[in-house]
Amino acid sequence: MKEIKAVKKVKGFATEQSIKVSEKTIVEIEKASSFLTDIGNVSLFIASITRETFSRNFEFKEFFRQCFQIGYKTLPLIAVTGTIMGLVLTIQSRPVLVDFGAVTMLPGMVAISLIREMGPVITALMCAGKIGSGMGAELGSMKVSEQIDAMEVSSTNPVKFLLVTRILAATLMIPLLTLYADALGILGSWAGANIKGEVSFFLFFGQAFGQIEFLDFFPAVIKSFFFGAVIGLVGCYKGYNAGRGTESVGVAANSSVVLASLLVIILDLIAVQITDMLI
């Protein structure tokens, strides 16, 4: 038990009283205080990002450089992931469809599964691991080496130059990477269908895209934009607010991946519920 001194006013006079509080209660109060502080810091961070995004003198050169770093340099990883995703989904689903005599439904089933759910989510999770950790580590190392402080001293706005460009680049590039993964996933599905059979390329793609409707495509693209924004925000926030020690760089990169992946799953759940209500 610990004693906390509190000031109480009795008939206009201040009196000091001692209140006994258990250590467990103190720990819970500190956790609640830390949680509320984090919410406040995140709110201020998002507000500053929003304000600088719509301000003048946008950093187009840095924005395009980040688009290249996030988009083009992630293409090999997404290409392998998308192809294997379609290949595995086809190999696993084909025996069940053969038993029911519904092999002709395989292209459409794979295409809808990839476009609606697997493509956006798997791509976002892969980008959370690569892009989120990269942002956290890069900005964390800049924080530790005091490069961000040097930018502020030299009258360069680090929020506009470092954070806004990265977040907008991630928001724009991840939907494009998702479409790229979907296309290669369907191509991998065709390759998987030809392992134990022979299916024409044009016939397979005709059956695949013949089952896709606008309501399959549009919600998946919209939620991909939110996935990109969340990955960029988390990576930049963790890196920009990293501690001063070198150990904080690894902590920022690791926490960026974990939190971004968790938020992607939560956002996907919310998006599925909203789509289900609208359809």
Image (tube, rainbow, N blue to C red):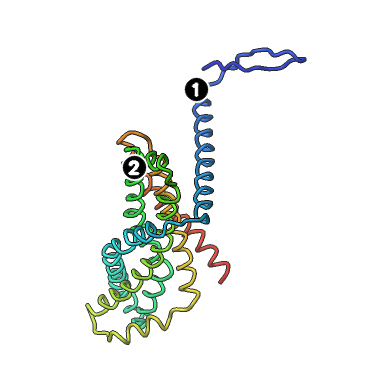
At a point 28% along the width and 73% down the height, the residue shown is 188
- Quarter the C terminus occupies: bottom right
Q: Secondary structure at mark 2?
A: helix
First along the sequence among labels 1 and 2: 1
Under circle 1, the secondary element is helix
Instruction: Decide if residue 239 is on the left or right side of residue 223.
Output: left
Residue 165 picture quarter? bottom left
Q: How many marks?
A: 2
Above/below status of 235 relative to 61: above
Q: Position of residue 200 (x, y in %)?
A: 27, 86
Q: Is residue 107 above or below residue 5?
A: below
Q: Residue furthest front?
A: 154
Amino acid at dot 2 = Met
Going by the image, does 233 lie left or right of 80? right
Q: Is residue 14 depicted above or below 87 in this figure?
A: above
Q: Which residue is mark 2?
A: 142
Note whether 12 is above or below 161 in the view shown: above
Residue at (50% x, 33% y) in the render: 31
Q: Mark 1: give few (<14), some (14-19) or many (20+) Cα within 10 Å.
A: few
Residue position marked by numbered label 1 in the rendering: 23
